[in-house]
Amino acid sequence: MRILFIGDIIGKPGRDVVGAELPRLRDVLKLDFAIANGENAAGGFGLTRATANDLFGAGVDCITTGNHWADQKEILSFISDEDRILRPKNYPAGTPGKGANLFVAREGQRILVVNVMGRVFMDPLDDPFAAVEAELAACPLGEGADAIVVDMHAEATSEKVGMGWYLDGRATAVVGTHTHVPTADARILPGGTAYITDVGMTGPRGGVIGVKRELAIEAMTTKMPIRFEVSTEDPWLQGVLITASDQPLRATAIEQILEPAPGIV
Ligand SMILES: [Fe+2]
Ligand SMILES: [Fe+2]
């Protein structure tokens, strides 16, 4: 089973890269399933119906999110009826939307995707470890699901590494998102879980984690409120390809995809 996870898609430049590259990648990489973090897909902030449809149209099967999931209020009108979009599960009870869903991949494999958010240097939500535990208890690997992918959206590397070890052997993959900078620690943990601390972002590397660099630097140097805009310079596709075997159920490879996409934007 071959699963592509695409790092945080930044605004139109990121959506354009996905639109240009994913149909080809689905074919070339023989993908069974494609997941993308879309929390910054609409102008850098949140997700709208139209931007989500752009991503689904390009071949994304499931969109995960993070702390920016509700930046566009429009999402509140459709997330409850849209099973392909997840928001972090460990938001308070009653928050619209869901944090996990069981999908059917290309050849009928059942794939559980879980989205949680860390609490270190972020909003103090409910315990992400307990939130994932509840999902795994309801749908264990090998029983309820043929593959389980967890998007751990978090700032602190320690919290993400901890989640990887916590789920080793119980999830197919634990991938970190949110920092928009890919890390160099992709590996298969001893129990068979593919792990990376951050997948990176799909968007303009010429900015500051997606924002026009002159605006980001102005905000940092003046400490005045600055309205951020998405950079269009140097768009890249950043993600990981996870390969998993059917028997025994374990990840066999995790490979970073870090590709410049010149001429897309
Ligand atoms: Fe992000
Ligand atoms: Fe984030």
Image (spheres, helix red, strand yellow):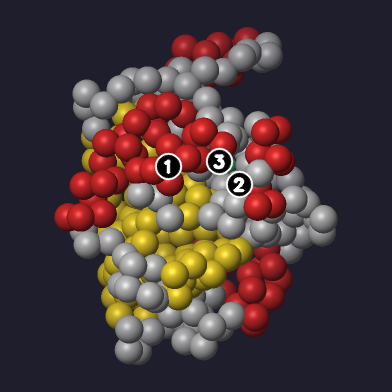
Is there CB contact under 8 Å for labels 2 and 1? no
Q: Which corner quadrant holds the C terminus? A: top left
| Disc 3 to disc 1, C-alpha distance | 12 Å
Check the image and report above or below for 141 versus 195. below
Residue type at mark 1: give it: Leu
Residue type at mark 2: give it: Gly
**Which residue is at the front of the view, 142 or 126?**
142
- Name the residue that disc number 3 marks: 39
Q: Residues within 10 Å of mark 2 (few under 14, many from 20)?
A: many
Residue type at mark 3: give it: Glu
The CB of the residue at mark 1 lies under 8 Å from ligand 1: no
Q: Secondary structure at mark 1?
A: helix
Is there CB contact under 8 Å for labels 2 and 3? yes
Tell me residue 11's x, y (percent): 47, 29
Q: Is residue 136 visible?
A: yes
**N-terminal label among 2 and 1:** 1
235 relative to 55 in the view: left or right = left
**Which residue is at the front of the view, 200 or 140?**
140
> Of tags 2 and 1, which is closer to the observer?
1
Q: Residues within 10 Å of mark 3 (few under 14, many from 20)?
A: many
- Name the residue that disc number 2 marks: 66
The CB of the residue at mark 3 lies under 8 Å from ligand 1: yes
- Name the residue that disc number 1 marks: 55
**N-terminal label among 3 and 1:** 3
149 relative to 28 in the view: left or right = right
Tell me residue 246's x, y (percent): 32, 84
Check the image and report above or below for 104 versus 72. below
The CB of the residue at mark 2 lies under 8 Å from ligand 2: yes
Q: Secondary structure at mark 2?
A: loop
Q: Secondary structure at mark 3?
A: loop
> Of tags 3 and 1, which is closer to the observer?
1
